[in-house]
Image (tube, coloured by chain):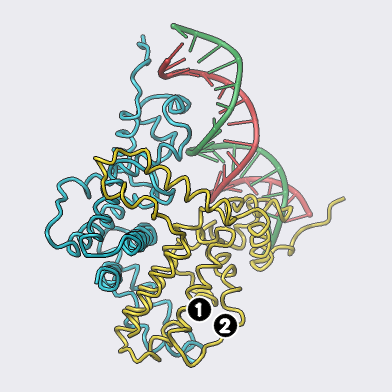
Chain colours: A cyan, B yellow, C green, D red
Amino acid sequence: MVTSKRGTLSREVICQAAITLIEAKGVNAFSLRAVAKSLGVDPAAIYRHYADVDDLMREVSDLALAPTVRDFRCTDDPRADVRLLMTRLRDVLLVNGVARLSALGPTRYPNELFITETMLDAALRCGLADEQAVLAYHVLVEYTVGSATLDAPLSQDPHTRARTYDIWRGDYAELAAADYPVIAQLRGLLYPGSDVVFEAGLDALIAQFLH
Amino acid sequence: MVTSKRGTLSREVICQAAITLIEAKGVNAFSLRAVAKSLGVDPAAIYRHYADVDDLMREVSDLALAPTVRDFRCTDDPRADVRLLMTRLRDVLLVNGVARLSALGPTRYPNELFITETMLDAALRCGLADEQAVLAYHVLVEYTVGSATLDAPLSQDPHTRARTYDIWRGDYAELAAADYPVIAQLRGLLYPGSDVVFEAGLDALIAQFLH
DNA sequence: ACCTGAACACCGTTCAAGT
DNA sequence: ACCTGAACACCGTTCAAGT
């Protein structure tokens, strides 16, 4: 006989099940029904704790940022702090494709708030005026999250990823050089790798915004 | 009696129906079944012309770029060319939220190829070496498309959009200033508007990469 | 060759019913 | 108060059947 399941559910239990599911099967395995199933619970039960699936996703996406935030300590070099924090943020968004969940706007949960506070503080420590600090913060986060969102669908496995770039580079070989002369000239150099591209842009933005 | 529908379908007809659907009801109304329905055709019929829904989306997303490409002419100022092209690309991705379709990797359709060719050419005209031209191209496109992807879910209506920022700014008012002192200090300045943020980052990247 | 129709395995969400 | 079960309106995709 099955005992009652009243009280077995909570936001914390649901979120943890979602994180476990994503870590095991990737972000595409995430759905409200899949989370309920992994808990052995009816899908409708989730609605006692979250308004809808977006509401759940927002909290899960913040929890997924924990590895970025845990153990992060500022140094006396604010530019290095920004660089490390944005690099780590990108990394964690790429793991299991979590970036897909972060396209819902700000969550206002603790890990996001820590990043915001740290970024704004670092910008001020660089000597920026308030308006400039805010602008630098927005641009850097937009660049980092946006870049991760585009890269997340790619395989995390380095070998598979390199093959993807090979294929994309190869696509250009089929074009008529007369139609696209510059692509034809440069196609061997395209897709140097998304890490290289991301860091080039990040360093450029830091150089430009943080003096 | 219904006449046979053999031959009524083609990639062009299907894509045009998809574009019309998206322009009428927004990108969230797009689905393979919705496109089929708007054509008065069985969903399975689409599979004679496209491998799957992603295959269809890739071609639709390139067609949606047409307004950016049509009538675009390079000038003798390559930096201005890059700035205008990226600004227009962002605009067209934000219209009807088309950016959501562009997160599937490169399409290799004509409008995308035009943008790639134009960007690489402009980078070379700035006097960049081949490797640097490729890097500048990747960073600028990643920033522009990434930024649009994050902004696309926001309402296009300026008033609704401003209200959204008001709400997001207001969220910070509920935080304890002791926990987040810098946010508390700067919260009135946050969310200056995504156009302002985007252009600040774009100009920074142009300044840094295109000398 | 091209389209239809039915079927399958999924979604998010609502609402009346149980305990 | 909390969870279940059934239902609704969607998805993408496959496959046998019609013409």
Q: Residue at x 48, y 48 (%)?
A: B166
Label 2 resides on the chain identified as B
**Residue at far left of view:** A76
Q: Check the image and report above or below for A197 versus A13.
A: below
In the figure, residue B202 lies in which quadrant? Answer: bottom left
Looking at the image, which is closer to me, A113 or B144? A113
Say the numbered circle drawn on residue A171: none
Name the residue tied to disc 2.
Answer: B72
Q: Position of residue A138 (x, y in %)?
A: 36, 59
**Element type where label 1 sits in the image:** helix
Q: Residue at x 53, y 53 (%)?
A: B161
**Element type where label 2 sits in the image:** loop
Name the residue tied to disc 1.
Answer: B84
Mark 2 vs 1: CB contact within 8 A: yes
**Residue at far right of view:** B1
Q: Residue at x 34, y 37 (%)?
A: A18
2 or 1: tag closer to the N-terminus: 2
Q: Check the image and report above or below for B45 versus C10.
A: below
Judge the density around disc 2: few (<14), some (14-19), many (≥20) Cα neighbours within 10 Å.
some
- The number of callouts visible is 2
Residue A138 visible in the shown view: yes
Q: Which three-letter amino acid code belongs to the residue tagged 1? A: Leu
Q: Which three-letter amino acid code belongs to the residue tagged 2? A: Phe
